[in-house]
Image (tube, rainbow, N blue to C red):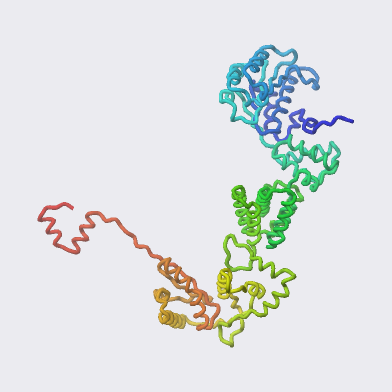
Amino acid sequence: MEHFIVSARKYRPQNFEDVVGQQAITNTLENAIKNNHLAQALLFTGPRGVGKTSCARILAKKINLENSNVSKDEDFAFNIFELDAASNNSVDDIRNLTDQVRIPPQTGKYKVYIIDEVHMLSQAAFNAFLKTLEEPPAHAIFILATTEKHKIIPTILSRCQIFDFKRISVSDAKKYLKQICEKENITADDDALHIIAQKADGAMRDALSIFDRVVSFSGTELTREAVTENLNVLDYETYFNMTDLLLSNKIPEVLNAFNAILSKGFEGHHFINGLASHFRDLLVAKDKATTKLLEVGDSAKKKYLEQSEKASINFLMQAIDKANNCDLNYRASKNQRLLVELTLMQIASITFDGEKKKSANYIIPATFFQALSPASKKTVKTTATKVEVKPTIEAKKPKPKLENPTLHSVRRTSSLSLKSIHEKKEVSKTKVEENYDDYPKDVFSEKKLLLVWSEYIAKLKKKGENSMSSILASDKPTLKDSFEIQFSVPNKLMKDQFHKGKPKLIKFLRENLNNYGISIKLILNEKKEKKFAYTPQEKYNKLKEKNPLIEKLRQAFELDL
């Protein structure tokens, strides 16, 4: 049986050209070697698995190759010394190192000392290393590598040329994995490699480890389904299907889909975070200029573009806000599943048009879905025929048409509960806002409007509603185009009082003017009086205007102002 070598070791870069995602650094190092401009102390810093140690080994080999006539296969093993500072962090270890530095190399021109995880050195070891690092022999080059630069003392940092390694991008990692698949005769879906690269979170070594694990699971064919199953991640299809249900206001199906996700072992927090990211990607896909920000495969990008056309910007902004609030409150919640379910129900209710007015946390009532279920269709149909709408106009006027009789029938409840009282209020509000397209719209003059307006004021006074009558009498209404009546009030308090009595006023005007296209536009005409700070001279002049004898008094006693 052939010995297996993990991909992280097997495909470790042997040249600067093989290093993934660090082109700026590798180009700088190559130019420094070529121009003999290389510093004697280098610090490679950055996240794990991005090529720091690999670059150090390549550099150590390359600087000796450039200054000798030996074969390119020569690895100069006797000239390269690696020290793991995590386990050799004492003062004695550093003293042994400084003693070795004095001895010149047997072959080649340089001795290279690679100190990995240098931030693990103790304070005393750092201090013992300072002098050697500042004035090393001409044949010695130090390469320090660390993932935590902030733990290194400033006196060491100031003596090093620092190279910051960046995280490997998803596209670069996916491209490198594709090359390995070609070498290993493995067929892989683009989305499968993308998920592996995304899961690695910027570390190429992690990407190769995940790649080995998935290949062991699925063999020589990597599919998106196999990768998501093995890595236990929620793939794009889960979020695409969930978003379709949310856009269609299908709350029961949404809750069932979320239950299926939980049954697979996923946390609600992980799901809601992924859903927020999905909404963000849909928002990005709205504009061609921002589609490059989508870090997804080509097939997934096509799906994002298609679904982004279905979702409005208003829906996505509200959905992201609700998902983020759920994320913030998740840890503190005692019933975390309920929190996510409520969030999903609120998101599914954003595009629902069954209510004219709804709060920010509105959820479609369960009775709506009961009405749509096959078992209740018959019941709803019979109750819908019993709905009576009292006519508010004369018999000669056409009867109003109910836009959604099923909805009205479903909303009818018992008058014995507190909930029914609130629902009856909502029904009464919707009655005021009925569709009056089929009602008469007789033309009337402003003179006739003033006459009917005065009749309504007199009617209010007779009923004892003096507050509303005084507001209506404070100004005269004016008639604009399209039967719009404009009326102004001087302050916000009167504006609020007017809005309370506005429905009854509109009903009275429509019936008496025989025009159901009338609307009222309220204008707040608030005038603030400016207060000035008077000078002593101005105060005196005001008093003198009221009583001229004050001037004689001032002169008699020789008073100052």
Figure check: 59 above or below 184: above
Q: Quadrant of the N terminus?
A: top right
Q: Which residue is situated farthest in the bottom direction here?
A: 396
Front-lying residue, 88 or 185: 88
Figure check: 93 above or below 331: above
Front-lying residue, 85 or 508: 85
- Residue at the spot 56% in from the left edge and 86% down from the top edge: 394
Q: Is residue 157 left or right of residue 544?
A: right
Figure check: 102 above or below 519: above
Q: Which residue is situated farthest in the front direction here?
A: 416
- In percent of width and height, residue 424 lies at 57, 73
- In percent of width and height, residue 368 lies at 67, 68
- Residue at the spot 62% in from the left edge and 74% down from the top edge: 412
Task: Mark yes or no: residue 290 visible.
Answer: no
Task: Mark yes or no: residue 476 visible.
Answer: yes
Q: Is residue 76 left or right of residue 489?
A: right
Q: Dividing the picture into quarters, in which one does residue 240 lie? A: bottom right
- In percent of width and height, residue 347 lies at 64, 58
How many circles with numbers are drawn on the protein? 0
Q: Which residue is situated farthest in the left direction here?
A: 556
Front-lying residue, 15 or 375: 375
- In percent of width and height, residue 325 lies at 59, 52
